[in-house]
Amino acid sequence: MNNANEISRQTRLFGYIGENAGVSRFSAVINKMFKANGDDAMMIPMNIREDDLYFTLSNMKKSHVNGAVISTEYVNDVVEILDEASGMVKKTGMCDIVFKEGEKLRGDVFSIRVLSEYLKDIRASKVAVIGVNAHAKAFSFLACGFNVSYFNENLEELMKFTEEVELKDADLNRIASGLTLDLSGFDAVLDFSDLNSLEMIEKLPPLSFDMKNTKQFSALRQRAQELNAKYVSYDDLIDKLTEQAYRLIIKG
Protein backbone atom coordinates (compact mmCIF):
# COMPACT_ATOMS: atom_id res chain seq x y z
CA MET A 1 0.00 0.00 0.00
CA ASN A 2 1.22 3.49 -0.73
CA ASN A 3 1.16 6.30 1.81
CA ALA A 4 -2.21 7.54 0.57
CA ASN A 5 -3.75 4.05 0.90
CA GLU A 6 -4.74 4.23 -2.77
CA ILE A 7 -5.23 1.38 -5.21
CA SER A 8 -3.57 1.74 -8.61
CA ARG A 9 -3.68 -0.51 -11.64
CA GLN A 10 -0.41 -2.01 -10.45
CA THR A 11 -1.65 -2.78 -6.94
CA ARG A 12 -1.78 -6.50 -6.19
CA LEU A 13 -5.16 -7.24 -4.64
CA PHE A 14 -5.90 -10.11 -2.29
CA GLY A 15 -9.06 -11.13 -0.51
CA TYR A 16 -9.74 -12.37 2.97
CA ILE A 17 -12.78 -14.57 2.47
CA GLY A 18 -15.06 -15.50 5.33
CA GLU A 19 -18.63 -15.36 6.48
CA ASN A 20 -17.70 -12.49 8.81
CA ALA A 21 -14.46 -11.33 7.20
CA GLY A 22 -15.22 -7.67 7.87
CA VAL A 23 -15.03 -8.05 11.64
CA SER A 24 -11.70 -9.89 11.55
CA ARG A 25 -8.41 -8.05 12.10
CA PHE A 26 -6.70 -10.17 9.45
CA SER A 27 -6.93 -7.70 6.55
CA ALA A 28 -6.06 -4.65 8.67
CA VAL A 29 -2.98 -6.32 10.16
CA ILE A 30 -1.57 -7.56 6.86
CA ASN A 31 -2.28 -4.21 5.18
CA LYS A 32 -0.10 -2.56 7.84
CA MET A 33 2.67 -4.96 6.84
CA PHE A 34 2.26 -4.07 3.17
CA LYS A 35 2.45 -0.37 4.00
CA ALA A 36 5.40 -0.69 6.38
CA ASN A 37 7.40 -2.57 3.76
CA GLY A 38 6.41 -0.38 0.82
CA ASP A 39 4.56 -3.17 -0.98
CA ASP A 40 2.02 -2.09 -3.58
CA ALA A 41 -0.52 -4.62 -2.36
CA MET A 42 -3.78 -4.61 -0.44
CA MET A 43 -6.01 -7.20 1.21
CA ILE A 44 -9.76 -6.66 1.11
CA PRO A 45 -12.13 -8.36 3.58
CA MET A 46 -14.84 -10.18 1.64
CA ASN A 47 -17.97 -11.20 3.54
CA ILE A 48 -19.10 -14.24 1.56
CA ARG A 49 -21.98 -16.55 2.42
CA GLU A 50 -21.44 -20.27 2.01
CA ASP A 51 -23.88 -20.36 -0.91
CA ASP A 52 -21.79 -17.78 -2.78
CA LEU A 53 -18.34 -19.24 -2.09
CA TYR A 54 -18.06 -21.34 -5.24
CA PHE A 55 -19.24 -18.47 -7.45
CA THR A 56 -16.80 -16.02 -5.80
CA LEU A 57 -13.72 -18.20 -6.17
CA SER A 58 -14.60 -19.36 -9.68
CA ASN A 59 -14.90 -15.73 -10.80
CA MET A 60 -11.58 -14.88 -9.16
CA LYS A 61 -9.87 -16.71 -12.01
CA LYS A 62 -10.79 -13.87 -14.40
CA SER A 63 -10.72 -11.01 -11.89
CA HIS A 64 -8.04 -8.55 -10.81
CA VAL A 65 -7.72 -10.30 -7.46
CA ASN A 66 -4.44 -12.22 -7.17
CA GLY A 67 -5.49 -14.64 -4.48
CA ALA A 68 -7.14 -14.97 -1.11
CA VAL A 69 -6.77 -16.21 2.43
CA ILE A 70 -9.69 -18.44 3.39
CA SER A 71 -11.20 -18.11 6.85
CA THR A 72 -11.31 -21.27 8.90
CA GLU A 73 -15.02 -22.03 8.37
CA TYR A 74 -14.55 -22.47 4.61
CA VAL A 75 -11.25 -24.38 4.35
CA ASN A 76 -12.98 -27.67 3.50
CA ASP A 77 -15.19 -26.15 0.80
CA VAL A 78 -12.44 -24.61 -1.32
CA VAL A 79 -10.59 -27.74 -2.44
CA GLU A 80 -13.05 -28.73 -5.20
CA ILE A 81 -12.68 -25.31 -6.85
CA LEU A 82 -8.88 -25.51 -7.17
CA ASP A 83 -7.08 -26.24 -10.42
CA GLU A 84 -3.82 -27.11 -8.67
CA ALA A 85 -3.19 -28.15 -5.08
CA SER A 86 -0.16 -28.65 -2.87
CA GLY A 87 0.64 -32.04 -1.43
CA MET A 88 -0.75 -30.97 1.94
CA VAL A 89 -4.07 -29.95 0.38
CA LYS A 90 -4.33 -33.29 -1.40
CA LYS A 91 -3.49 -35.27 1.73
CA THR A 92 -5.78 -33.38 4.11
CA GLY A 93 -8.71 -32.08 2.05
CA MET A 94 -8.34 -28.51 3.35
CA CYS A 95 -7.06 -25.29 1.80
CA ASP A 96 -6.67 -21.92 3.51
CA ILE A 97 -4.77 -19.84 0.95
CA VAL A 98 -5.20 -19.61 -2.84
CA PHE A 99 -3.15 -17.89 -5.53
CA LYS A 100 -4.30 -17.02 -9.02
CA GLU A 101 -1.83 -18.10 -11.68
CA GLY A 102 -3.09 -17.12 -15.11
CA GLU A 103 -6.70 -18.26 -15.01
CA LYS A 104 -6.04 -21.08 -12.56
CA LEU A 105 -6.23 -21.25 -8.78
CA ARG A 106 -3.50 -22.97 -6.79
CA GLY A 107 -4.20 -23.88 -3.18
CA ASP A 108 -2.05 -24.53 -0.12
CA VAL A 109 -2.24 -24.86 3.68
CA PHE A 110 -0.51 -22.41 6.00
CA SER A 111 -2.52 -21.99 9.21
CA ILE A 112 -1.70 -25.39 10.71
CA ARG A 113 1.99 -24.80 10.00
CA VAL A 114 1.67 -21.61 12.04
CA LEU A 115 -0.01 -23.50 14.87
CA SER A 116 2.66 -26.21 14.82
CA GLU A 117 5.49 -23.67 14.93
CA TYR A 118 3.77 -21.77 17.74
CA LEU A 119 3.55 -24.95 19.83
CA LYS A 120 7.26 -25.52 19.25
CA ASP A 121 8.03 -21.92 20.22
CA ILE A 122 6.27 -22.34 23.56
CA ARG A 123 8.04 -25.68 24.05
CA ALA A 124 4.88 -27.76 24.10
CA SER A 125 5.82 -31.41 23.77
CA LYS A 126 2.91 -33.58 24.89
CA VAL A 127 -0.20 -32.75 22.86
CA ALA A 128 -3.75 -34.11 22.91
CA VAL A 129 -5.65 -33.95 19.61
CA ILE A 130 -9.43 -34.31 19.63
CA GLY A 131 -11.17 -35.15 16.37
CA VAL A 132 -10.27 -36.53 12.96
CA ASN A 133 -11.10 -33.70 10.53
CA ALA A 134 -8.86 -32.06 7.95
CA HIS A 135 -7.21 -29.81 10.54
CA ALA A 136 -6.32 -32.88 12.59
CA LYS A 137 -4.84 -34.54 9.50
CA ALA A 138 -2.75 -31.49 8.69
CA PHE A 139 -1.42 -31.25 12.23
CA SER A 140 -0.58 -34.97 12.25
CA PHE A 141 1.51 -34.62 9.11
CA LEU A 142 3.40 -31.75 10.80
CA ALA A 143 3.61 -33.33 14.26
CA CYS A 144 7.23 -34.48 14.09
CA GLY A 145 8.80 -33.70 17.47
CA PHE A 146 5.53 -33.84 19.41
CA ASN A 147 4.29 -36.67 21.60
CA VAL A 148 0.68 -36.83 20.40
CA SER A 149 -2.31 -38.69 21.83
CA TYR A 150 -5.48 -38.87 19.75
CA PHE A 151 -9.07 -38.74 21.02
CA ASN A 152 -12.32 -39.33 19.16
CA GLU A 153 -15.89 -40.49 19.81
CA ASN A 154 -15.65 -43.35 17.33
CA LEU A 155 -12.55 -45.55 17.67
CA GLU A 156 -13.09 -47.12 14.24
CA GLU A 157 -12.97 -43.65 12.69
CA LEU A 158 -9.84 -42.93 14.70
CA MET A 159 -8.14 -46.11 13.49
CA LYS A 160 -9.02 -45.25 9.90
CA PHE A 161 -7.64 -41.76 10.51
CA THR A 162 -4.29 -43.15 11.71
CA GLU A 163 -4.04 -45.23 8.53
CA GLU A 164 -4.73 -42.18 6.35
CA VAL A 165 -2.05 -40.10 8.08
CA GLU A 166 0.33 -43.09 8.22
CA LEU A 167 0.63 -43.26 12.01
CA LYS A 168 1.98 -46.42 13.59
CA ASP A 169 1.53 -47.38 17.25
CA ALA A 170 -0.38 -44.17 17.97
CA ASP A 171 -1.95 -43.56 21.38
CA LEU A 172 -5.68 -43.80 20.63
CA ASN A 173 -8.38 -42.89 23.12
CA ARG A 174 -12.16 -42.62 23.20
CA ILE A 175 -13.85 -39.39 24.21
CA ALA A 176 -17.60 -39.38 24.79
CA SER A 177 -20.35 -38.09 27.00
CA GLY A 178 -20.49 -40.08 30.22
CA LEU A 179 -16.75 -40.66 30.31
CA THR A 180 -14.43 -38.50 32.40
CA LEU A 181 -11.19 -37.18 30.99
CA ASP A 182 -8.21 -35.54 32.69
CA LEU A 183 -5.96 -33.74 30.18
CA SER A 184 -3.86 -31.92 32.77
CA GLY A 185 -0.86 -34.13 31.98
CA PHE A 186 -0.58 -32.62 28.49
CA ASP A 187 1.10 -29.36 27.54
CA ALA A 188 -1.71 -28.48 25.12
CA VAL A 189 -4.96 -29.77 23.70
CA LEU A 190 -6.11 -29.16 20.12
CA ASP A 191 -9.82 -29.58 19.53
CA PHE A 192 -10.54 -30.37 15.89
CA SER A 193 -13.81 -32.15 16.62
CA ASP A 194 -17.43 -31.17 16.00
CA LEU A 195 -18.51 -32.10 19.52
CA ASN A 196 -21.19 -29.81 20.93
CA SER A 197 -19.90 -30.21 24.47
CA LEU A 198 -16.62 -31.12 26.14
CA GLU A 199 -18.14 -31.46 29.59
CA MET A 200 -16.46 -34.88 29.94
CA ILE A 201 -13.11 -33.08 30.33
CA GLU A 202 -12.55 -32.51 34.03
CA LYS A 203 -9.13 -30.89 33.74
CA LEU A 204 -7.47 -29.07 30.83
CA PRO A 205 -3.76 -28.58 30.13
CA PRO A 206 -2.08 -25.14 30.42
CA LEU A 207 -3.13 -24.25 26.86
CA SER A 208 -6.25 -25.13 24.85
CA PHE A 209 -6.39 -24.45 21.12
CA ASP A 210 -8.84 -24.74 18.28
CA MET A 211 -8.78 -22.99 14.92
CA LYS A 212 -12.24 -21.46 15.22
CA ASN A 213 -12.79 -17.73 14.96
CA THR A 214 -14.76 -15.82 17.56
CA LYS A 215 -17.94 -15.93 15.47
CA GLN A 216 -17.97 -19.73 15.45
CA PHE A 217 -19.29 -21.82 18.30
CA SER A 218 -16.43 -23.41 20.25
CA ALA A 219 -17.09 -26.17 22.76
CA LEU A 220 -13.46 -25.87 23.86
CA ARG A 221 -13.75 -22.15 24.53
CA GLN A 222 -16.88 -22.82 26.57
CA ARG A 223 -15.21 -25.58 28.61
CA ALA A 224 -12.05 -23.53 29.13
CA GLN A 225 -14.15 -20.71 30.55
CA GLU A 226 -15.92 -23.11 32.87
CA LEU A 227 -12.61 -24.52 34.12
CA ASN A 228 -10.84 -21.14 34.17
CA ALA A 229 -8.24 -22.40 31.69
CA LYS A 230 -6.40 -20.53 28.93
CA TYR A 231 -8.00 -20.83 25.49
CA VAL A 232 -6.43 -19.74 22.18
CA SER A 233 -8.56 -19.21 19.06
CA TYR A 234 -7.79 -18.56 15.39
CA ASP A 235 -8.22 -14.84 16.08
CA ASP A 236 -5.74 -14.99 18.95
CA LEU A 237 -3.13 -16.26 16.47
CA ILE A 238 -3.80 -13.60 13.83
CA ASP A 239 -0.49 -11.79 14.30
CA LYS A 240 1.40 -15.00 13.56
CA LEU A 241 -1.01 -16.07 10.82
CA THR A 242 -0.64 -12.75 9.01
CA GLU A 243 3.15 -12.94 9.22
CA GLN A 244 3.13 -16.28 7.44
CA ALA A 245 0.48 -15.22 4.91
CA TYR A 246 2.52 -12.09 4.18
CA ARG A 247 5.64 -14.15 3.45
CA LEU A 248 3.70 -16.43 1.10
CA ILE A 249 2.07 -13.52 -0.72
CA ILE A 250 5.31 -11.61 -1.21
CA LYS A 251 7.08 -14.79 -2.28
CA GLY A 252 4.32 -15.16 -4.87
Image: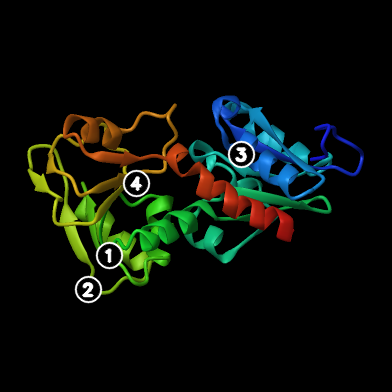
Q: CA distance from mark 3 to mark 2?
A: 42 Å
Mark positioned earlier in the residue sequence (4 or 3):
3
Mark positioned earlier in the residue sequence (4 or 1):
1
Q: Disc 2 marks which residue?
A: 169
Mark positioned earlier in the residue sequence (2 or 1):
1
Under mark 2, the amino acid is Asp
Residue furthest to the right in view is 9
**Mark 4 surroundings: few (<14), some (14-19) or many (≥20) residues within 10 A:** many
Mark positioned earlier in the residue sequence (2 or 4):
2
Mark positioned earlier in the residue sequence (3 or 2):
3
Q: Disc 1 marks which residue?
A: 125
Residue 209 x/y as whole percent: 33, 45
Of the 4 image quadrants, the one containing the C terminus is bottom right
**Mark 2 surroundings: few (<14), some (14-19) or many (≥20) residues within 10 A:** few
**Mark 3 surroundings: few (<14), some (14-19) or many (≥20) residues within 10 A:** some
Q: In percent of the image, x 39 and y 39: which residue is there?
A: 233
Q: Disc 4 marks which residue?
A: 192
Q: CA distance from mark 4 to mark 1?
A: 18 Å
Give the label, 3 or 1, closer to the camera: 3
Q: CA distance from mark 2 to mark 1?
A: 18 Å
Q: In the rendered view, does 232 fall on the left or right side of 17?
A: left
Which type of secondary structure does the marked residue at label 3 adopt? helix
